[in-house]
Image: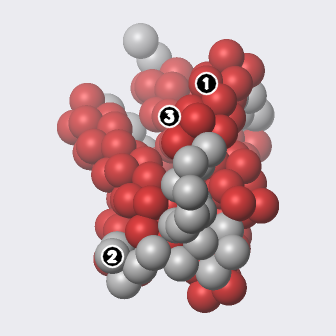
Amino acid sequence: MQQSNRDIDFLNMVYDTAQMGEKAIGFLQEKVGDQSLRGDLQTQYRQYADISNKVENEMGKKGKMPKQTNPVSQAGLWSGIQVNTLVNRSSDHIASMMIQGSMMGVIEMSRALKEFSDVAQESKNLGQELIQMEENNVQRMKQYLGDKKGEQQH
């Protein structure tokens, strides 16, 4: 496979991961009652959007545009969030969901960086930036673990 194609494939993976994070937060925000958690999620949303924009710019330099996120994946994400927050909308539960999603992003990007070790440094930097952002998000979400704000009473 040509080098530029590998760069495009890698950048599409970075873009897809950032878009899934952005969409997950978009679906979750309406369910968050804790203003502090909502503010942290909005910050994360902007960070994901920033990474997506950087990928778009990098791909634009190569005359390409990112592939749009698979609608089936988006539907699965939406339905998973709906089911997961049906009974429990506590800050603890939402933070736990975000931590799990961020850790999946770290794992996927770490594997991709290893698999695509030959891509341009600018592309690698975006993958590394996404990993660092995800790891920081995990640390930020930990403060909400054990917090039952927003939990529905039966």
- What is the distance, in whole Å, between disc 1 and disc 3 at their CAs? 18 Å
Residue lying at 39% horizontally and 59% vertically, measured from the top left: 96
Q: Residues within 10 Å of mark 3 (few under 14, many from 20)?
A: many
Residue at the far top: name it. 1
Q: Identify the image quadrant of the C terminus.
A: bottom right
**Quick one: label 1 or label 2, which is nearer the N terminus?**
1
- Is any part of residue 120 visible from this angle? yes
Q: Nearer the viewer, mark 1 or mark 2?
A: 2
Front-lying residue, 23 or 66: 23
Where is residue 11, by image quadrant?
A: top right
In the rendered image, which residue does mark 1 sit on? 76
Amino acid of disc 2:
Gly
Q: Secondary structure at mark 1?
A: helix
- Is any part of residue 20 visible from this angle? no
Q: Nearer the viewer, mark 1 or mark 3?
A: 1
| Contact check, label 1 and label 2, Cβ < 8 Å | no
In the rendered image, which residue does mark 2 sit on? 146
Amino acid of disc 3:
Met
